[in-house]
Image (spheres, helix red, strand yellow):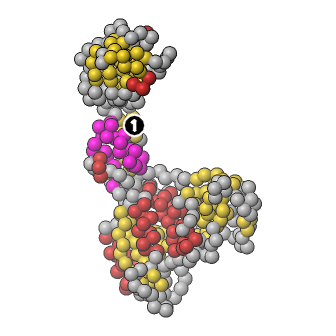
Amino acid sequence: MIKFEEALKLVNSVNFSLATVRVDINQSLGHVLAEDVFSDIQMPPFNKSAVDGYACRNSDLKNTLEVIEVIPAGVSPTKSVGPNQCSKIMTGAPVPIGADSVIMVEDVEEISEKKIRYLKDDVKDNICYIGEDLKEGEKVLEKGTPIQPQHIAVMATAGAVSPLVYKKVRVAVISTGDELVEPHFKPASSQIRNSNAYQLVAQVNKIGAIPEYIGIAKDTEESTREMLLKAFENNDVVLLTGGVSMGDYDYVPQVLNEMGIKLQFKSIAVQPGRPTVFGIKNNQFIFGLPGNPVSSFVQFELLVKPLIYRLSGYAFKPPKIGLPMGVDYRRKKSGRLSWLPVEINAKGEVIPLEYHGSAHINALVNARGLIAIPVGETELKKGTIVDVRQI
C-alpha cells in the first residue's frame, strides 16, 4: 500500500500525449489545442459605433445638427461629418470620418426629418476603436487550452477555422462480477445492477474523452482476459471496476501480469478507494478501480481524470475553493487520507453529506465537491477553512 500522494505522483509522471490532428472548428469542442492561436485581423477592424444614435463632433453638441446620411451595420459611410453635421448610425456600423462621438438616439430630439438637437450636456464617445480588442498577430489562445464554446468564438474571430488539436483519449470501461446485471434487468435476490460502468462512461464523456463500454466480465480468468484484450484493442485507457481486491475470485492482477502490464501500484492508503490498481504497457494505461460506486467515482476524479487530461495535452489543475465548515465533523479512524462528499449551503458553508460508506452512491446526488481529511486528523471544527475540490 502506498500513500495517495505517491500514487498521484506516479500518475502525473506519465510524460506522453496523443498525436495531433487538424479538425474543423465545429468539431473542436472538447479537444485540447496543440498550438497557440494568433489573430489574423485586428478587432474591431474599424472604428465602430457601440450604440444606435448619431455620429457627430463633440464640439458641436450644443448646436442643432444636420443629418447627412444613415449608416446601417455592414455598410461603409459615404460622407464625412463636417461642422454642425451628423450621420444617423446603427450599432456596429463604421463611424464616419470627422465624427469623434456617437450620441444615443434616446438622448436626441428630432426637430425635423433632417435636424436634431442633443438633450444632454456631455457624452461618452460610444466608439469601439480599431484594434482595441485584438491586434493582428496577437496570441488569443494558448497551446494546452481545453476548447470550450467561448474559445470557439475566439477562434472564429481570429480565423482559426482548422485548429491543431490533440486527439481525444479513447477509454474502455469494463465491470466485473457474476452478481452484476445491466440496469434494464430487475436483479434477482443475489444480484445487483451495474451502476459503475454507466457512471464511468458519463464521467469520461464529461471531460471530453471517448468512452467504449465493453461489458461485464464474469468471475473467471478466461472472461477477464477476453474482456481486457478487447478493451486494449482500440483504446488508450482501460477502466475496470471490481476484481482488484484479495477475494478468491479476483483474477485481475494475475491476468494483468500475464498480459505484460507493469503495475505501478496495487493499493492506496486512501478512503474510499484503497484497492485501486494502476498499470502501464507501452503507451496504454489501465486503472483497476474498486467495485463500490462511490470509490470508483472518487478515484476517477482523483487519479483517472488527471491521466486522461495529460494524454489530451492538458495540464490539469483541480478546481478548488476555500470555504468554512458549517458544522463540526468527526471521524473514528484516522489512519488513511479520507475524501468526503460535501454540499455548500446558502451561507457558503461546507456541510458533509450523510454518507454510509463506499456503496452509498446516493450520497453523491447533492455533492458539490470533495474535501480531504489528512491522516491523523479526526475532526474538523465549524468555521475551519477547507479546500473544496469541485466535481
Examine the structure image and report whether residue 166 is included in the region drawn in magenta: yes
Figure check: 68 above or below 184: above
Residue 41 in sight in this render: yes
Figure check: 90 above or below 173: above
Q: Which residues are magenta?
A: 144-167
In the image shown, does 2 or 289 lie closer to the viewer? 289
State the SS at label 1.
Answer: strand
Figure check: 387 above or below 191: above
Task: Say whether residue 277 is left or right of residue 133.
Answer: right
Q: Please identify the quadrant where the N terminus is shown.
A: bottom right
Examine the structure image and report whether residue 140 is included in the region drawn in magenta: no
In which quadrant of the rendered view does residue 162 lie? Answer: top left
In the image shown, does 69 or 291 lie closer to the viewer? 69
Q: Residue at x 41, y 41 (%)?
A: 142
The kind of residue on which mark 1 rests is: Val
In the image shown, does 58 or 222 lie closer to the viewer? 58
Task: Say whether residue 296 is left or right of residue 103.
Answer: right
Query: 10 Å neighbourhood of mark 1: few (<14), some, or many (≥20)?
Result: some
Q: Which residue is farthest bottom? A: 189
Residue 96 in sight in this render: no
Task: Say whether residue 248 is left or right of residue 335.
Answer: left
- Measuring from the top left, give residue 130's x and y in whole percent: 36, 24
Residue highlighted by disc 1: 140
Q: Which residue is farthest top? A: 83
In which quadrant of the rendered view does residue 70 lie? Answer: top left
